[in-house]
Image (cartoon, grey):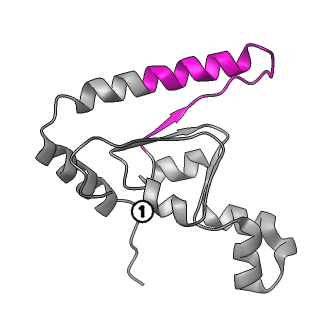
Amino acid sequence: MAKLKVPIIVIIIGEGSSGGALAISVGNKVIMLENAIYSILSPEGYSSILWKDSSRAKEAAEKMKLTAKDLLELKVIDKIIKEPEENTSETFEKICKNIRKEILSTISDLSQKSENEIVELRYNKFRNMGEFITL
C-alpha cells in the first residue's frame, strides 16, 4: 500500500487493531473518531504477554497509548473527529456528517498533489510517526 499512487484515507470508527493496524497506518490521512481505539494488540493480549496476567488490561491500555488523543500526539493519526457527548437518535447522523466532511476535505487537498507527491507524503508521514528516545 505504501507505493500506491492514489491517496489513501483511513477513518478509524471503533477499534483498529491486530495486523490490520499496521496496514492502515500507511494512509495519507488517518482520521479517528474521538472514542475509537487503535493498536496492534488488544490490552488483554499485551498484558498477557508482558505480565502473564490478562487482568492487568486497564494498566496495559494506559501504557499502550491507544486513544485518539495519544495517537495524535505521537503523529500516528492526523486528526480527531469529535463525537457528540449525548447519545440520541441524531448522534449517528452527526458523526456521519462529520466523517463525510473530513473525507471530502481530504480528497480536495490530496487531489491537488501529483502521484509522486502522494507517495512521498505518505512515506514521510510514516517515517515521522512516534518518538525515538536515546537512553
Quarter of the view holding residue 115:
top left
Which residues, given as a range, are shown in magenta? 78-102
> Which residue shows up at 48% across the image and 47% down it?
72
Secondary element type, mark 1:
loop
> Which residue shows up at 29% across the image and 41% down it?
7
State which quarter of the image contains the N terminus: bottom left
Q: Which residue is mark 1?
A: 130
Compared with 64, 108 (above or below) is: above
Residue 113 in picture, x, y percent from top left: 16, 35
Question: Does 102 sit left or right of 2 as displayed?
Answer: right
| 45 vs 63, nearest the viewer | 45
Compared with 112, 3 (above or below) is: below
| 77 vs 13, nearest the viewer | 13
Residue 4 in picture, x, y percent from top left: 25, 52
Residue 86 in picture, x, y percent from top left: 79, 21
What is the number of callouts on the image? 1
State which quarter of the image contains the C terminus: bottom left
Give the residue furthest to the right: 55
| 56 vs 44, nearest the viewer | 44
Is 89 a magenta residue? Answer: yes
Compared with 108, 12 (above or below) is: below
Give the residue furthest to the top: 90
Question: Does 34 sit left or right of 117 as displayed?
Answer: right
> Which residue shows up at 37% across the image and 55% down it?
26
Quarter of the view holding residue 23:
bottom left
